[in-house]
Image (cartoon, rainbow, N blue to C red):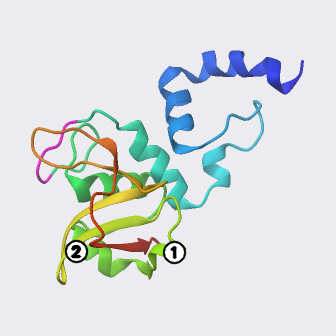
Amino acid sequence: MTALNRVPSLLTRAGTASALTLAVAGGSLMAPGAATEAAASPPGMEALQIAASKQGSPYQWGASGPHRFDCSGLTLYSFKRAGKKLPRTAAQQYNHTRHVSASHRQRGDLVFFHAGRSVYHVGIYAGKGRIWHSPKTGAVVRLERIWTNSVWYGRVR
């Protein structure tokens, strides 16, 4: 059986949500017994996939999962599941990361929104100018275009 013939079977076993998460986050399906995409990925990519799997989860101020999130709660939860420890707030997370320029950003980096020197929001960079984030009361975890140039990038070490 060729790898192409195994894809429908793998999709059935993986489930629609897992396949959708892999497609959105840019992952790939591998043959049974092979190393998983998560195991082969750096923590940022794994955290990105975890955040994408929380699509539709409601925003709740101060929540850090597993079913409700605020912005920094989503990044905290996602990186914790990927094996990395982050502080609780967006500003603390910014101070905990290795800062990178927009030209060197990578999928899985954190995107920090700021007004002057004050960080007020965080999401996980998904590529093509988009982030996974939990935006505000009444909203849900979603993929969205970055709407401002007032952002800084940080890589979790």
Confirm or deny contact between disc 1 and disc 2 (CB under 8 A).
Answer: no
Percent position of residue 5, x then y: 81, 17
Q: Dominant secondary structure of the magenta stretch?
A: loop
| Label 1: which secondary element | helix
> What is the distance, in whole Å, between disc 1 and disc 2 at their CAs?
22 Å
Q: Could one spot residue 157 in this view of the protein? A: no
Q: Which label's residue is closer to the chain start, 1 or 2?
A: 2
Left or right for 117, reference 126 = left
The image shows residue 147, relative to residue 153, as above or below, that is above
Q: Amino acid at mark 2?
A: Ala
In magenta, the rendered stretch is 58-62
Residue at the extreme bottom of the image, as rendered = 117
The image shows residue 149, relative to residue 4, as above or below, that is below
Residue on which disc 1 sits:
103
Percent position of residue 140, x then y: 22, 38
Q: Are there few (<14), some (14-19), or many (20+) residues within 10 Å of tag 2?
A: some
Left or right for 15, reference 11 = left
Q: Amino acid at mark 1?
A: Ser
- Please report the residue visible at 46 percent of the width from the left and 79 percent of the height from the top: 100
- Please report the residue visible at 52 percent of the width from the left and 52 percent of the height from the top: 46
Q: Are there few (<14), some (14-19), or many (20+) residues within 10 Å of tag 1?
A: few
| Label 2: which secondary element | helix
The tally of labels here is: 2
Residue at the extreme right of the image, as rendered = 1
Queried whether the magenta region covers residue 19, the answer comes back as no
Percent position of residue 11, x then y: 63, 21
Residue on which disc 2 sits:
91
Camera-nearest label, 1 or 2: 1
Percent position of residue 119, x then y: 20, 74
- Please report the residue visible at 90 percent of the width from the left and 18 percent of the height from the top: 1
**In the drawing, what numbered circle is on residue 92?**
none
- Please report the residue visible at 39 percent of the width from the left and 57 percent of the height from the top: 124
